[in-house]
Image (cartoon, grey):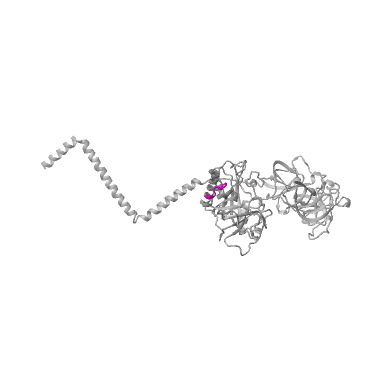
Amino acid sequence: MGKLRKRINEIKKYVLRNKRVVIFNLVRAVIGIAALIAVIMLVRHNFFENNDGKKAAEPEQTEQAAESEETKEAEEEISIAAEMGAMEDADDPQSQAAETDGAAVDLVVRNAYETSGRTYGIDVSKYQGTIDWAAVASSGVEFAMIRAGYRTQSTGVIYEDPCAKYNLQEAQKNGIKTGVYFFSTAVNEKEAREEAAWTANFIARYKITYPVAYNCEGFRSETSRQYTLTREERTNLAVVFLDYVQKKGYTGMFYAAKSELEGNADWDTDVLESRFKVWVSQYPGTAYEPTDKSSYSGTHSMWQYTNKGTVSGISKTVDVNVAYFGYSQEAEAKDSSAPESVEANPEVGINFKEVSETVTAKSQTNLRSVPDSADPNTVVMILNNGDTAERTGIGSNGWSRVICNGKTLYAVSSYLTADLSYKTPAASGTASVTYEPVNEQVTAKIETNLRSKAGSEYTDTIVTVLHNGEMAVRTGIGSNGWSMLEYNGQTLYALTSYLTTDLSVQSQPAETEPTPGSPETGNEEMKTKFTDVNERVTAKSMANLRSLPGAEREDTIVAQLGNGDIVTRTGISDNGWSRLDYNGQTVYAVTSYLKLAE
């Protein structure tokens, strides 16, 4: 016991004399013990991970990876709102793109012996007007590439193609598989990503089976936003767009002309064709059937072989394509929510001059949901003289676009005036006249003038002429021998004895047409003789369409016919006037201002 005590005292003395050395050795010992414990724990962890713990670790790793991917995707999400594009948009880049004419081709039902693996389709936009998709489907069209939208050439604003929703809705309703394209003028990656994000969001509720294509043209023009971009920069923007849509689950496809692709002329074709489908535009001198394949030798999956296709249900020529692939069934929409149900754009094919003015009706005028009077059910309300509406556009078809009570409606332009002090002239002798209310369709027994007021004393009350076979709705039969009619959006009057409710009555072929000097009583010397014809014509430049064959009065102008606008000529007179069928109405134009449509 004494020895132990003595040994303890010696240790105390040693520690007191060598404090620093002792502390250092203790620290080393602690570190060594900690390291040993860490090694033991690591070996134990690896053992369990490679055995029982292995399966539990994998889901955690997958979840972390997915979380990282979601974060990355969220960073890429862009919310872009686009306005509805106008039918007549001078800043629409597709209207400015240079286009070489292809061979004319009439697309009909494909024969059973067509090579398997090929499918036949069209690409359309607002420039094809309102399309009858049921008729298109019956013609054998298997797919349609529909323009979703575009970025404007000068301002760089994204717009929705005004016919896109209707085209997607109706094409799919009639069993035609669809793809889309976006017309880009992006100048940097941010804009390309915006375009892709907008496109993916716009089409999410539709069944997009065929590819989503990137279309970029006109960049060689000095007025283009993309004029200063290099080939590599343009290519990179296409890649950004197509990468984005492919991440959203769509097939990306790049569109360009043969001349732009060959030899990497305007695009880095090697890069694009290695990553995406290529859609080449190349128009041979002869139609597709004799020319079995494109002269473009590069890799491509779709060939646009003409811009002069004629397809049932489309009133204008259309681009026609052959795809070297097809799909056995329609794709599902990325978003299961039902897309918005839309009606056909009523302004398709009509050139509206934008205005901003307050107008009133010269007399009681119908405001309709469409710029056409064929269907009486399109009347939404009546604008009376003294009531006002805001006119926002004057159409080339004789109709005005107005906003009334918050609704966009249409009225015959000649029935409106910006002179808000205008008062409807009082009809003479109407105080004792009573009209028995009726609601029936009538036509002219032969032909009769329709007037702004009942009475034939004044020739300047003649608004138009009703011919046998043309319909008007009679709303009243007057005690004065006149009928009150609804015709082309206005209340007009005609002699009751010249009308019939028997719509099957056929008049004898007439060689005469009325002029301003031939009221209902008839004046053979004042009548104009017409030789019946049936041919399509257009204006050489611009021609006034009139309700009567004479240029003496400005108020007979119904509309203007521009070069390229097509109407049917039904008669040619011996005094230099042509009789035309325009939007269901008989009008007249100077023959020398017209030419046969090609």
Q: Position of residue 469 (x, y in %)?
A: 78, 57
Q: Is residue 182 left or right of residue 520?
A: left
Q: Position of residue 572 (x, y in %)?
A: 81, 53
Q: Is residue 459 left or right of residue 68?
A: right
Q: Position of residue 355 (x, y in %)?
A: 70, 42
Please state the horizontal and vertical placement of residue 190, each as a whole percent of the image. 53, 43
Q: Nearer the viewer, residue 313 or 183?
A: 183
Q: Is residue 268 in the magenta section?
A: yes
Does the stretch in magenta take in 551?
Answer: no
In this rendering, is residue 517 above or below 142? above
Using the image as rendered, state which of residue 66 and residue 253 is in the foreground: 253
Q: Left or right of 9: which side holds 572?
A: right
Residue ranking furthest to the left: 2
* Residue 322 in view: yes
Q: Which residues are magenta?
A: 264-270
- The quadrant the N terminus occupies is top left
- For the residue pair 150 and 160, the one nearer the viewer reads as 150
The residue located at (13%, 40%) in the rendering is 7
Say left or right for 242 vs 167. Answer: left
Q: Nearer the viewer, residue 323 or 364?
A: 323
Residue under the point 25% across and 41% down = 28
Q: How many marks?
A: 0
- For residue 90, what is the image quadrant? top right
Residue, far top? 17
